[in-house]
Image: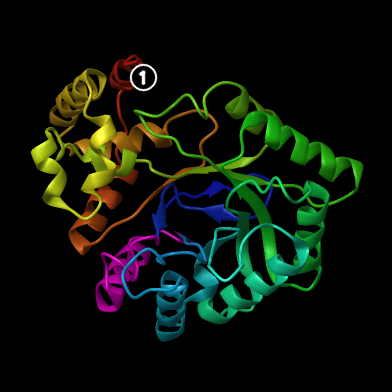
Amino acid sequence: MKTRPLGRTGIDIAPLVLGGNVFGWTADESTSFAILDRFSGAGFNAIDTADVYSSWATGNKGGESETIIGKWLKSRGNRNRMVIITKVGSDMGAGRKGLGAKYIEQAADASLRRLGVDAIDLYLSHWPDPATSYEETLGAFQQLRKKGKVRAMGASNLDAGQMRTALDVARTHNLPRYDVLQPEYNLHDRSGFEGALRDLCIAEGIGVITYFALAKGFLTGKYRTKADLGQSQRGEDVGDYLTPRGMRLLDVLEDVARRNNAKPAEVALAWVMAQPGITAPISSATSVEQVQSLIRAASLDLPASDLALLSGIRP
């Protein structure tokens, strides 16, 4: 499978990243192993997770996703073939949160133990932390890299102004910069990335891996009424998309899918992959069947006319 350079990290990844947010939640360990086997077996090489996944599930405390991934890596002996992406900063309880230097090193060590690896390939700050300076956070990342615990660094959920400031601080203080951004971006939710933030990433050579590439599942097409929201545990997150614009988008998405002998979700992912500045979208799967759909999406080459049609659906 053809890979893409992940910004200036020196890391190459396949055009789609597997989301690990479902591991230990809607996918138990054995199902997660089957998903990971099929995904890696198809030539994909990047897995996204976070220390906080999946703390929201009953009985969990955080770290479950990393633990499952770590067990899978050990059992398959394929660490050198996989790119592991994880994050720090979300609230893990008991005061464990934020981007302070002391906490970042503690959190990184905990993630390394759960993952069972010597180094994290890409370590991301999960959310902005207004209580901590970029200089302190980037300095902490620098120390992790010097110790060989992290290969590359990035950030999630920064806007254009925040990203610009972080880059300026890195230059001024001779610190490692954020080389990757993880923003929310999909066919429905575009304004947060398109424009100044995308322009900045392209100009600075920053890799971009997007989350919620299927708009929390809305772009699969299975949610069209409030009655549909009970189809899955994530259905309650989709209600805000049930608008006239959302329905119009689904109609066009399904038309394009029929013309290309594909599913709406595959078309939605292929659209993201084709957008300027995007390295790869992140998408999760709760079954091997869904992984098969991800595989098809990565090879779907949409005609320019269909890409333009989909892009033209604005608020």
**Image point (49%, 50%), residue name:** 3
Front-lying residue, 122 or 205: 122
Stretch in magenta: 20-47
Percent x, y of residue 141: 75, 60
Judged from this view, the residue extending furthest toward the bottom is 75
Picture quadrant of residue 47: bottom left
Q: Residues within 10 Å of mark 1 (few under 14, many from 20)?
A: some
Judged from this view, the residue extending furthest toward the front is 94
Q: Which residue carries the number 1 mark?
A: 311
Residue 116 is at least partly visible in this image: no
* Residue 220 painted magenta: no
Query: The C terminus appears in which quarter of the rendering?
Result: top left
- The three-letter amino acid code for the residue at tag 1 is Ser
Secondary element at image label 1: helix
Image position of 313 with respect to 120: above or below: above
Image position of 8 with respect to 242: above or below: below
Percent x, y of residue 203: 69, 28
Image position of 197 with respect to 105: above or below: above
Residue 1 is at least partly visible in this image: yes
Image position of 47 with respect to 215: above or below: below
118 relative to 265 in the view: left or right: right
148 relative to 197 in the view: left or right: right
12 relative to 1 in the view: left or right: right
**Image point (28%, 20%), residue name:** 306
